Amino acid sequence: MSPWPRRSIRRRLTLMTSIIMGLVYSFLAVVLTMSFRDIADNYRTEQIAQAGRRLVYELDQGKVTSPIHSAGSTMMQVVNEKGQVVAASPALMGKPRIAAFEPAAGDVRAIRRECHSKVAPSECLIIVTYRVFRSGGDWLVYAADFEAHPFIDPVYILVLAGCGLVLVGVTAAATSRSVASALNPVHAIRTELAEITGTDLGRRVPVPDHDDEIAALARTANETLDRLHAAVEQQRRFASDASHDLRTPITAMRTQIEESLLHPDETDWRETASALLESLNRIQAIVTDLLVLARLDAGIVGRTEHVDLAELVRMELAGIPALRVRVETDLEAGVVVMGERIRLTRLLMNLLTNAERHASTVITIKVSSMDAAAVLEVIDDGAGLAPEDREVVFQRFARLDSSRSRDAGGTGLGLPIARQIAETHGGTLVVGDSDRGARFVLTLPRAEP
């Protein structure tokens, strides 16, 4: 792999901006040099034209003599109407006509650049021609000089190069400083995240004062840490409560076995086996609920199908033994949801089992539809739930004191499992208001017909 991706963002941005600034400066330097060259050529042309105009004036005044004396390096010729050179600068004495072109008809001046002429075979000349009107015919005045030399002064090159290096250096330093300042919060976030461990999840990354993408990243990281902290705390409480609930029947079994072994001849082994079997059933119930929760937490999804809630309630009530209380139903037909039949059955049975434990005489099950939602209600006529306990009952292994005193055989996982099944189906499970007893309300999205 190329080492480029492994460079830091600061180095990459500094290098890229320096290269871009160098390219931009080089382009501007070339344009500036060409502009200077054009300015020099225009200045040279204007000098030549000025010398030609002066010679035209002298020709009109009859003051032209050969050789022509002029200031500077401009070479000049005067050509009569027959095309003969009648006067010339010292450099052109005895040489042929410097150029063959003339101003266009109606014009008095023409400018042309010619190279490899007979006068200067190895140089390029800027030639300005004037038409002079005479009585016997038009005369021509030629003024010429060598074009600006393309040679560039080394001092000019050194100045351009020095300015370029200074500009690129300043750009690199400014970019490096700016990027470093922008990335300082990222470094602080990374340092804080590296120091956070599983035993110190209460720490949070610093959020920059300015509201930008890095601040949004810090807030998102803190929200993620909040969720992680809550999940870890939940798992810790879950493990602690599970250990406690499993330890209770195991301790009871150990005590019974130790007492029986101390007095084997006096022990009723059938009674002891029955007691041990009861404890094993409790352990099995807890382990089964733990496995269900593990599958729900892992997001394992089974086969989904259309489930008619009224039909599901009737089938389950017909398949269970007689309950200790009466069950009344109010089932609306055609209320269908899309879900896993096994899990929805588990949800219903958990609600029904909870209602049976707390009901006095009757349990009411209702199925109805409300707009695009399917609603299942399980209502008992027991003591009910205080408003502050309506969410507590959905916590894992959370059993209220009244529940513990009344029903020591519950696992404390039935209602949490029921709520998680509801949520995996895109619904909700809450404790609703009721005149008497507890009213659990399941709401699921209705399936398309």
Image (cartoon, rainbow, N blue to C red):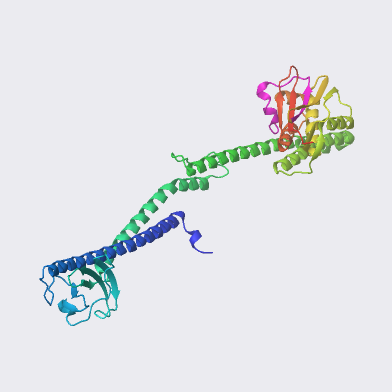
Task: Pick whichever, 38 or 251, lies toward us.
Answer: 38
- Residue 56 in the image: state x and y as whole percent: 16, 68
Residue for point 22% across, 67% down: 44
Q: Quadrant of residue 154?
A: bottom left
- Residue 314 in the image: state x and y as whole percent: 86, 30
Task: Pick whichever, 141 or 331, lies toward us.
Answer: 141
The magenta-colored residue range is: 373-397
Q: Is residue 233 above or below residue 11?
A: above
Task: Pick whichever, 306 or 258, lies toward us.
Answer: 306
Q: Is residue 67 above or below residue 202?
A: below
Q: Is residue 320 magenta?
A: no
Q: Is residue 69 left or right of residue 402?
A: left
- Residue 405 in the image: state x and y as whole percent: 74, 24
Q: Locate the C terminus and report the quarter of the image it occupies.
A: top right
Q: From this viewpoint, is residue 372 visible?
A: yes
Residue for point 46% across, 39% down: 211
Residue for point 37% across, 60% down: 22
Q: Locate the N terminus and report the quarter of the image it occupies.
A: bottom right
Q: From this viewpoint, is residue 259 visible?
A: no
Q: Is residue 165 left or right of residue 223?
A: left
Q: Is residue 378 magenta?
A: yes
- Residue 209 in the image: state x and y as whole percent: 43, 39
Q: Quadrant of residue 254?
A: top right
Q: Residue furthest bottom?
A: 94
Q: Is residue 45 left or right of residue 277?
A: left
Task: Pick whichever, 49 or 442, lies toward us.
Answer: 49
